Image: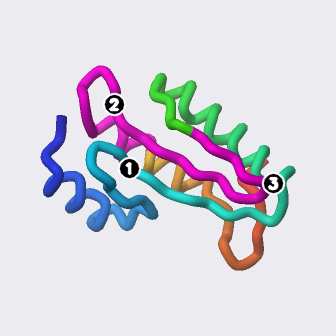
Amino acid sequence: MLPAAEVDAALADQHLAWTREGDELRTTVQLRDFAAALAFVNAVGAAAEAANHHPDIDIRWNTVHLALTTHDSGGLTVLDLALAAAIDRLRPDAVTGTGPPA
């Protein structure tokens, strides 16, 4: 398990679009519509499967809320930071509303 200060430093150093809330990393992604949100979630799912580490996902029409924690470690680990970085690479352009790469 990583100390909170180390997680906060990694978020800042890597310019990750996530915030630490207790023992979770959280982010919200807004997309152009529901279909784009589903495409993004499918891309996140593929990354999660590849990492064998899975976020909590909540879809609200065009808005996707994600949370990461390592349940069996009881908090945040390098797995969470690595998957957060991978998910950030899938994030759509916030201005154009484009979806994840095909």
Tag 1 or tag 2, which sits nearer the N-term?
A: 1
Mark 2: secondary structure? loop
Please, is residue 66 above or below residue 20 in the view? Answer: above
Q: CA distance from mark 3 to mark 2?
A: 27 Å
Task: List x then y, in percent, for residue 4.
Answer: 17, 52
Disc 3: CA contacts within 10 A as few (<14), some (14-19) or many (>=20): many
Task: List x then y, in percent, for residue 20.
Answer: 32, 55
**Rendered residue at 76%/75% (across/down):** 96
Disc 1: CA contacts within 10 A as few (<14), some (14-19) or many (>=20): many
Q: CA distance from mark 3 to mark 1?
A: 23 Å
Range shown magenta: 57-83
Q: Nearer the viewer, residue 6 or 25?
A: 25
* Residue named by callout 2: 70
Tag 1 or tag 3, which sits nearer the N-term?
A: 1
Task: List x then y, in percent, for residue 19.
Answer: 37, 60
**Rendered residue at 24%/29% (across/down):** 74
**Rendered residue at 36%/37% (across/down):** 69
User: Relative to residue 38, is residue 85 drawn left or right?
Assistant: left
| 64 inside magenta stretch | yes
* Residue named by callout 1: 25
User: Relative to residue 94, is residue 96 drawn left or right?
Assistant: right
Q: Amino acid at mark 2?
A: Thr
User: Relative to residue 64, is residue 88 drawn left or right?
Assistant: left
* Residue named by callout 3: 36
Q: Amino acid at mark 1?
A: Leu
Please, is residue 8 above or below residue 95 in the view? Answer: above
Query: Which dot marks residue 51?
Result: none
Residue 10 sits in quarter? bottom left
**Rendered residue at 76%/69% (across/down):** 97
